[in-house]
Image (cartoon, rainbow, N blue to C red):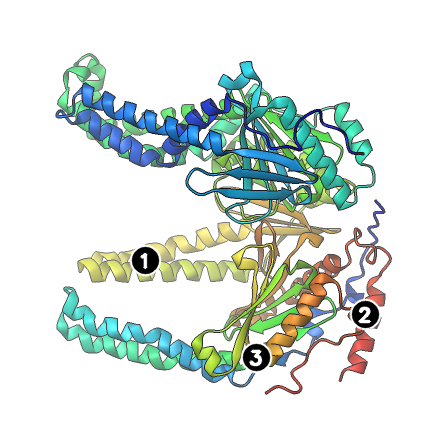
Amino acid sequence: MSERIPGDSEQWQRLSPWALLILFLGGLLRFVRENLPLVAGAGAGAALLEQIGLRELGLALTLILLIAGLISLLYYRRFRFRLDGDVLVVQRGVLERREVKVSAERVQHMALEQPVYMRPFDVVRFSLDTPGGATAEVELPGIRRELAERLQQRLERARGEAVGDDDPAGAAESARTPSPPLFRIGPLGLTRHGLASNHAYVIAALLAPVLQPLERMAMRNPELLAELPWLERAAESPWLALSVTVVALLLVLMLVSVVVAWLRFYGFTLVREGSRYVQYSGLFTRQQQTLSAAKLQSLEWVQTAVGRGLRCGYLVCHQYGLSAGPDTAGQHFLVPGLRQSEGPTLGAVFWPGSGDEAAGALELGYQRVHRLYRRVVALRLIVIAAVLALIFLGLTGFPGWLALIGVGAVIAWPVAWLRWRAVAWRRSGRFLCVRRGLLGRRTTLFPLEKVQAVTVQQSWVQRRRQLATLHLQLASGPVVVPFIPLATARAVANEALYRVACRPSLPLGAEQQPGDQAEQGQEEQDQNP
Amino acid sequence: MAFSNAPVDPEALPRLEAQSLQPVSRRFAPYQLISRFLGLLPLGFIAWLLPVMTGVPMALRPVLLGGVGVLLVVSPALSWLEARRRAWAVREQDVTYHSGLLVQRTTVLPFVRIQHVETASNPVERAFNLVRLTCFTAGGAGGDLVIQGLEREQAERLRQYLLDRIQGHADASDEPPPEASDGV
C-alpha cells in the first residue's frame, strides 16, 4: 500500500525559496502581535518625541528589518525535513540545532495555511499538532502545496493503519470524492460571529496604551477639533463627551471584530472525509485544518454574552491538550457563526454512530443542581465583599467601605440564583453534557469513555445533605458538576470507569458485561481478605 | 470496526464507594505536621520584620506575631488530623486515593489512562522513609494523581505494578496488587 511519491520525501528536503518571504513577514507579524502593547507604546512614544527626527527613525527601522531578514535567512538555511517511513523528521534552529521526530499515529491535528502573497507560487505553511506540552507543534513554513497534501495523505494513511482502521483504502477513496459539506457559513453568520466574539475586549486591552498618546496629541493640536463645531459643543458637557467617546469606541471595536471575523472565516466550509473532518476558510490567508474523529475528546458549544442576545454561537472541537487560551488564537478547530438551532444538531454529527444520543444530550431538558448551591455561592460572594471591604478599610481608613458589605449582601442572592440557574447537566446514553456560565454559556459534551480520572468531592456542608461535586478530568481539561446527589455522582463515576476500562475498541470490552466484572470482583474479594 | 453499545445496568456496575481503602503509613501524619510547620515558619519572620521594613506601626507587631502564632499551631494540627484519614486502594482496573478533612475527595484513576509513573521524596520525607508517587495522565498537571504517604518499599512495589499494568505485561488475576499488610 506504499505509494511511491516521485522523487521527494525520503531524502532530506529544504523549504521552498519563497518560504523566506513567509519567514520574514510571518516572523515580523508574530513579533508585533505577541508584543503589541510594547510596540504600540514605543511607536506612539517615539512619534511624539520631538527629538527623534525622521532620519533616525528610518535608520532604526531599516536596522530592525535587516536583522529580521538575516535571521530568516539563517533559519531557512538550517531548516530541513524528510519523511522516514511513518516518522516525519524535522531539523531546525538558528542558535540551537533541534531535531523533532513525529510519528504518524501521534498526529492529532493538521493544518495548511496559505497567506495571500503566496498564492501565485502555490506555497503553503504546513503545521502538525501532537498531544503534548510546549513543543507539541511542528511547522513547515513554506512548502509546495502538492508536497504538503502528499505528506498529509501519507501521514493520514500511516496513522489509519497504526490505529487499526479497517479500510484505509476506503478512506482514501472517499477523500477523492468529496461529500456534501456539513456546514457552510454565510455573510449573516460571519457578521453575527464578529459581533458576538470577545475579540473586541482583547483588542481594547491591547490598544489601551495607545489612547493616552492620542489624547495628548489631540490636546496639543486643538485646531483639529475646530473643524467640527458639533464636537466642540459636545466636548463642553462632560457627560455627553464621555458617552459619545464610549459609543464611538464601541462602534470601532465592533467594526474591527466583524472585519477580523470576515478575514478569518470567509467561505468557511466543513466536510467529512472518511474518518476525519476538514475545514476550509479564510479570505486572504486561506486555511485548511484537519481533525481526526478518533482524537476528538469533547465538544463545546460556546455562546458569549452578546451571542446569547443574537442567538448565535460557535462549536469548539477539543483534542488532547489544555485549551485554556482564547478561542481566537487560531489553533483550535472551531466552527463559527452557528445559529442557536444549528449548533446542537451539528454537534451530534461529530460522534458518528451515536448521533441521536449526542443530540438528545444537547437539546432536551436539563437537570438542575441542588438548591444549596445558591446559598453557598451567595455566602461566598458576601464573604468576598466583606474581605474586600475590610482590606480597603484598613488601607484608607474610610469607614464608608463597610457599605460594600451591605451592597454585597443585597446583590449576592440574585447573582447566586442566576448562577444556579446557569448550571445544568444531562446524561444521555454514554454522553454527558454540562452547561455552565453566567453571562456567556459553555456547554461541554463528551462520551464517558473519554474520561481520564474521576473525583467525587464533598465539603462538610455537602456531607450533611448527601450531596457531592463531581470532577471529571478529560484530556482537554476538567469538567465539574457541582451539588448533585451523592448517589448520582457515584453512579456516573462508576459508569465512566466501567466505560473507560471496557471500551468497544478494545477486543476484551465488547463482550464483557457489568455482571461478569462484578463476579470477578467478588471472587477477588473472597480470595484476598 | 465492531461497535457495540449495549445499555449498562447501573446496579450491576462495580462501585467505587464499596472499596475498603487502606490508610497510608502511620508516619505520614507526623511528617505532614512538621512539613506544614516548616512551611509556615517564614511567615513568622515576615511578621517580625514587617513593622521594621514598611510603614506598619510597631504597636501592631504583637498582634501580627500572635496571629502567626495561632496559625502555626492550628494549621499543622489540622494537617495532622487530615493526614491520618488519607487512604488508598488498588482494583483490577484502577487506583483510588482519598484525602481531605473538611473537603474530602476520592479520586479514581484507571490504569489505561496512566501514561507514566514517578516516585519522589524531599529531605523531610526521606527522614520518615516516605515516598510520593505521581501518576501522570493526559489531562495536564491538574489531572495527575499524587499518592502521598507511602512507605518506600510499598511505593516501589506499587510503582512496579502500575508500570507492568501500563505495558500490559501483567495479568490481573496472576499478580495480586500490593497491599499494606506487611508495611507499617
Q: Which of marks 2 and 1 is nearer the N terminus?
A: 1
Q: What element carries label 2?
A: helix
Residue A131's place in the image compared with A41, above or below, is below
The part of the image, by quadrant, that contains residue A495 is bottom right
Residue A268 marker: none
Residue A518 marker: 2
* Residue on which disc 3 sits: B152
Which residue lies most toward the front here? A11
Percent position (x, y) of residue A457? 57, 66
- At label 3, the amino acid type is Arg
- How far, Cα to Cα, is label 1 from label 3? 54 Å
Residue sitting nearer the eye, B62 or A237: B62
- How far, Cα to Cα, is label 2 from label 1? 55 Å
Percent position (x, y) of residue A334? 58, 34
- Quarter of the figure that contains the C terminus of chain A: bottom right
- Quarter of the figure that contains the N terminus of chain A: top right
Residue pictured at 57% horizontal, 79% vertical: B152
Residue A425's place in the image compared with A515, above or below, is above
* Residue on which disc 1 sits: A406
Chain under disc 3: B
**Badge 3: residue crowd in 10 Å (few <14, some 14–19, many ≥20):** many
Q: What element carries label 3?
A: helix
The part of the image, by quadrant, that contains residue A292 is top right
Chain under disc 2: A
Mark toward the viewer: 2 or 3 = 3
Residue pictured at 16% horizontal, 70% vertical: B51
Mark toward the viewer: 1 or 3 = 3
Which residue lies most toward the top here? A227
Mark toward the viewer: 2 or 1 = 2
- How far, Cα to Cα, is label 2 from label 3? 32 Å
